[in-house]
Image (cartoon, grey):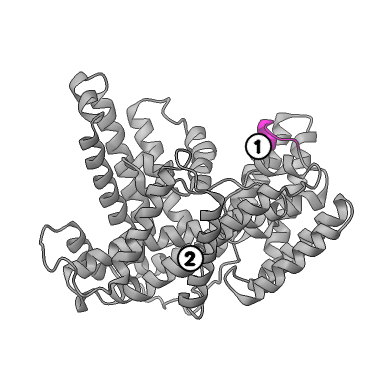
Amino acid sequence: MVFATKAFWVFLPTVLVLYHVARGRTHKYRILLVASWFFYAWLSPQYLWVILLCTTIDYVAGIKIEDAATDRGRRRWLALSVAANLGLLVAFKYTAFAYDNAVSLARLCGADVRDRVWDVLLPLGISFHTFQGISYTIDVYRGHVRAVRGAIDYALFVAFFPQLAAGPVVRAVEFLPQMATPPAVTARQAADGLHFVLLGLFKKLFVADHLDALVVAPVFADPAAFGPADHRWACLAWAAQIYCDFSGYSDIAVGLAKWFGFELPRNFNLPYLATSVPDFWRRWHLSLSTWLRDYLYFPLGGSRGGALATYRNLMVVFVACGLWHGATWPWLVYGLWNGVLMCLHRAWDHGLAGVPWAAAVRATWAWRLLAWAATLWLTTAGLVLVRMTSWESGAVLARSWCGLDLYAAAGSVPVWVPALVALVALGHVIGGLRGRVELPSAARAVAYVGIVVLLVALGPAAGRPFIYFVF
């Protein structure tokens, strides 16, 4: 069941009514849990057992970790939880990738091995709820959160349907304290929920889906049929599309959670205003970036072991980030690309540390503008890797994106494409002014009505699946 479908907009009001009219904590959470499992089973009925198994293992492991008399016993239960979650994730997500590469290697050695004739369908949101389960048991082990004793409470934490399919990756310390008593929905939460839901639907249906149909899908499918200017617009449009698609889902999830009284962490913070690659990753997919930092980078040693160890740790983290997104070589190279950029930026920063003239230059608006343009150029180049249909077509697009030719400034792209890309840029500018400029209530109301009108009049007849559903 996808947010932008008729079935969901029958499901949602039904669940909201049942949840809010129910009396008592237990009844409310049972209704929400059953609804969340129904949401999961709608899209992955054959894999309902996966989330039930992960939930059971982590629930029991959390209690055993907290009750264990020795640190050795606590480590054993933690290892069981981590191994179970990663084992299921690897089995479903990486088996086909490993098999295909093993076949290629065997053929290089002269063996006659058949191609794979089977495929593995990913369970809904497995990359998200497995990371959520791992963070829970680690936090219990570290003493950051108490083990959940109520099975319904823990199951709801894992399966809460607004963020189940594509995040954000919610941590126990963020969500479980809110469950102590069913939170009442304030008028502000109801209004903010409407804001985020409408904003997310607008990003997804009006911006992301139109950009995909107008330029991204056709140009990436056959770059040879288009010129360099079209390639550049397609690359920019793809960067805008993936942002609006994923942040649109996250906005809807945040908004829906507010209607049940819960607060989910924001997953994006205007990433295309970043002025460096590290700054970009402090703004993009925040729940994953901070998860990798706290549960992988810091345990590896972080930046405490000297320059070479720090560079190694950064590369490990970003290779893991790439592979988390997808079990393909382009995603692996995407992780390597960002890891190298992070290492180069760290070396650059350390090399200029304490240099007075460098500090003065970097404080100027001209330098910040140059840094912003370079960051956008580099991060978009990386995103091309994960949208290309082949290495050959990717090379064509990369040459155009990195080239200096001025062939046809606008190319043959429809006028809607630069307009929609500009709309994304405008959204970042307005977002950057948040806190300095507050729109009057009447202006917000007009904007909401305008969004609804645009979605009804110009929205696609059938929305495309959210990109991050396949992760």
Which region shows up in magenta? 140-146
Select label 1 or label 2 by which is in front. Answer: 2
Residue occupied by mark 1? 139
Residue located 78% across and 40% down the image: 64
Few, some or many residues within 10 Å of mark 2 (<14, 14–19, 20+): many
Q: CA distance from mark 1 to mark 2?
A: 34 Å
Residue located 69% across and 40% down the image: 76
- Is residue 274 shown to the viewer in this render? yes
Is residue 48 left or right of 180 when viewed as pictured? left
Is residue 355 left or right of 280 when viewed as pictured? left
Determine which quarter of the picture holds residue 50.
Answer: bottom right
Q: Position of residue 259 (x, y in %)?
A: 69, 55
Few, some or many residues within 10 Å of mark 1 (<14, 14–19, 20+): some
Residue occupied by mark 2? 204
Determine which quarter of the picture holds residue 216.
Answer: bottom left
Q: Earlier in the sequence, mark 1 or mark 2?
A: 1
Is residue 267 left or right of 424 when viewed as pictured? right
Observer-nearest of 94 and 203 = 203
Q: Is residue 292 shown above or below 213? A: above
